[in-house]
Amino acid sequence: MLKGVRPVTQVLLAVAFMEAGLGVLSPLISLDLAQKNVSTSLIGLVTSGYFTGFLLGTLSCHWVIDRVGHIRAFAVFAAVAGNATLGHIIFNEPYAWIALRGLLGYAFAGQFVVIESWLNDKATDDNRGRIFSYYMAVSWAASGVSPLALNFHDRIGSVILFCIIAMLFATALIPMALTRVGNPEIGDRVHFGIRKLFTISPTGVVVCFGSGLLNSAYYGLLPAYAERVGLSTGELAILFSASTIAGLIIQFPIGFLSDHFGRRPLMLISLISAAALAALVASLDTPAFLTLLVVLFLLDGATAPLYALGVGQTNDYTAKQDFVAASAGLLFAWGLGSAIGPTVAGFVMGWLGPFGLFWFMVGGLSLIATFVTLRILVRRALSAREQSNYVAVPMTAGTYGAPELDPRAAPHHHPQKIPDM
């Protein structure tokens, strides 16, 4: 087992440092803006800046990689990420932070393209599923533990935290730069356009888009909500870590049930449950922290598997050799939703107050649930035997998706470009 993973050990170490930094950076930025009484609409724009940059990076960062190779490209993206992080200290203007967040998104899209193409190139048919599992485990663990660093916010201040995060991003470069394993082979790229993908699986596209729309808004604006309703920084840190734990725990029963009873019924159950829980939070005028923790834990668990269910639904109708191209299209749909969601949710919060975040989620979840219901009525579901297996994918602010490493896909030893519309 160790022999098969040894060629990618340095890459997994880099992932741990990157996800650790990202796990605390995203809530820290929103928290800082909320404590400065910046409007929620502007906080939403800053959050959307990251995902807009991320989306643009997935469309164009391969040019840098093709030009200079994976290790040099990774160094470039790491330098951009570190500089953009420190830029939040130098430029104390929220509108400047939109551009800085965009740079961060672009840089991390490039880094994850390098990492995932590297992992795929070094994987074999025998260990690809195991490497995918390690990659997902490292991503989940680092992004789940790191938000607890917000507990130090009141003691050491945001300036030092920004510096520590920049150090983590720089440290991620060390194992990559010291590796003696050769660069991955750079090959041709394949993709499905969104229109073609929508004809294959409308439900998959809509659910993946909705997952990005809602989760990016939730994680981007939860610090603003917490600040407005009087939660402490330590309580916010616990909420963020609990959300990752909830997402991890729910994947196993959801995977088992969806493989036996179908994707769309599980989607519908998750969507309706999440909408009811979001409505409950929105109705709590002065929520006690313990009550809020329990309800949000359940809400996070209900929304976490939506992207993986959308991918599974699409994969059920896609030939194995086309899975990577189809997944690239779904990642584009997710990124597009992520770029839109925080901006819209921020304006809704400006209109309805802090609880507007959860009314936004109620509306979005209800619309997606309605669409899924209509699709159930017009298209027969595949039998359990006809379906592919469910694979858990954590779609956080950092993780790119690893479609080529997905055990359901045919071996595909080169990076791909996220498709244009």
Image (spheres, grey):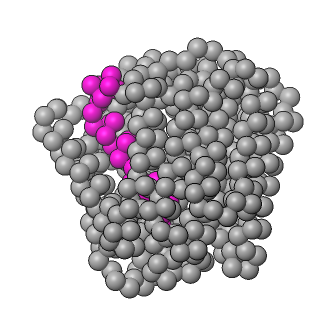
Q: Percent position (x, y) of residue 86? A: 75, 56
Q: Is residue 294 left or right of residue 233?
A: left
Q: Residue 357 or 145: which is nearer the viewer?
A: 357
- At x 59%, y 61%, the residue is 94
Q: Is residue 155 above or below residue 296?
A: below
Q: Quadrant of the C terminus?
A: top left
- Vertical relation: 97 (above or below) 81: below
Residue 277 quadrant: bottom left
Residue 294 seen in render: no
Quarter of the N terminus within the rendering = top right
> Residue reaching furthest top?
188
Prevailing secondary structure class for the magenta stretch in the rendered image:
helix
Q: Is residue 291 above or below residue 73?
A: below
Q: Which residues are magenta?
A: 195-222
**Quadrant assignment, res 74:** top right
Of 151 and 96, nearer the camera is: 96
Residue closer to the observer: 255 or 184: 184
Residue 193 seen in this snapshot: yes
Q: Within the magenta stretch, is there residue 201?
A: yes
**Residue 241 highlighted magenta (yes or no):** no
Residue at 56% x, 42% y is: 53
Q: Report x, y in % for residue 259.
A: 34, 40
User: Which residue is found at the position 61% from the left and 49% from the top?
Assistant: 99
Q: Provide residue 399's location: percent of width, then percent of height.
A: 57, 44
